Amino acid sequence: MRLSRKSEYALLALIDLARQHEKNEVSKIVEVAERNDIPKKYLEQIFLQLKGAGYVRSIRGAQGGYELAKKPDEITLAEIIRLIDGPLASVGSASLYYFEHTPIEKNEKLLRVFKEIRDMVSEKLENLTLSQFV
Amino acid sequence: MRLSRKSEYALLALIDLARQHEKNEVSKIVEVAERNDIPKKYLEQIFLQLKGAGYVRSIRGAQGGYELAKKPDEITLAEIIRLIDGPLASVGSASLYYFEHTPIEKNEKLLRVFKEIRDMVSEKLENLTLSQFV
DNA sequence: CTTATTGTCTATAAATTTTATAGACTTAGT
DNA sequence: ACTAAGTCTATAAAATTTATAGACAATAAG
């Protein structure tokens, strides 16, 4: 899978929150944005999406901000990338979570190769959590 | 990396040519297109690109067509995908052939993960040739 | 030597995705 | 009240993907 800029931002922002998590601190969007060179307005949207999926919690109003909604070791790279970018697989027809028919199915051996690659990639990303990157 | 439809078409078309290669036969674009359900006009462009890169040869005029310019076991999946889609890596900053700076470089450990994934994927695709799929 | 067949080349278009930016609104602390 | 922060929805600019169109060039067959 190709990571979008948005996924890269999401991972960096979550790791940032994971660091604050250790200090039991809440971060404002603008702080996370500045620390990681992420456009603030874009990060707002990303956090909303992460919040909708239950990875972060927000506190509104003055002195508000964001914090992780789970422990850093309970959030894997795989689920974040799937949330933001969709399939980990290289082709839709090799994807489990986002299957769709694509021309490559015409050649079974070829399809098998991309399923094997998907397996290697998922295995790796599903076993890495935010806690490994703080 | 995410494979584009175009890459899927290119692989299928090349494998088709590899089959004809065994019979020492030339294929017309329209034949390859029909056998593999590829839009003919799109396949024209793909073949032109593959020709430019030296993977296929064309014979012009009546009774013309396309054939492989190399032996099937001399063409790897990796090089075709790189030609059509660019980087195998998930992020530009983990790519050797198409390196570019991206935000993820801010976290070295994270970058290392995507370099490891790139290595696994390249290793696999560089060791598979068209001959394995005829 | 004319015609039919097939590849060549370049432009363009439609759709989708990516990468944001804008601004009005809501909530909560002081 | 006022200010600081998150919320929500719309929109836009750019890039990429996925083709389609059509005029042109080369070659074989009759």
Image: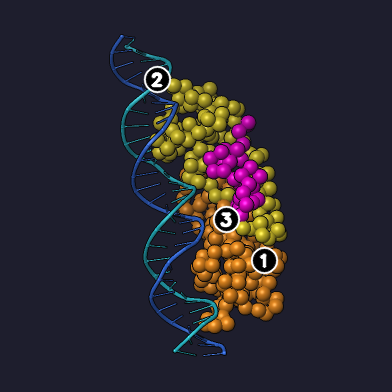
Chain colours: A orange, B yellow, C blue, D cyan
Examine the rendering and report whether any part of residue B35 can be seen: no
* Disc 3 target residue: A3
Q: In whole angstroms, how far apart are the C-alphas of marks 1 and 3?
A: 17 Å
- Residues packed near mark 3 inside 10 Å, few (<14), some (14 to 19) or many (20 plus): many
Q: In whole angstroms, how far apart are the C-alphas of marks 1 and 2?
A: 60 Å
Q: Amino acid at mark 2?
A: Ala
Question: Residue, x 65% and y 40% (percent of image)?
Answer: B126
Tell me the chain of label 2.
B
Tell me the chain of label 3.
A
Q: Which of pointers 2 and 3 indicates the residue nearer the eye?
A: 3
Which quadrant of the view contains residue B40? top left
Return the residue nearer the eye: C1 or B106.
Answer: B106
Which quadrant of the view contains residue C1? top left
Residue B80: x percent and y percent?
57, 38
Q: Is residue B44 above or below residue A63?
A: above
Of the image marks 1 and 3, the number of the one nearer the N terminus: 3
Q: Which residues are magenta?
A: B73-102
* Disc 1 target residue: A129
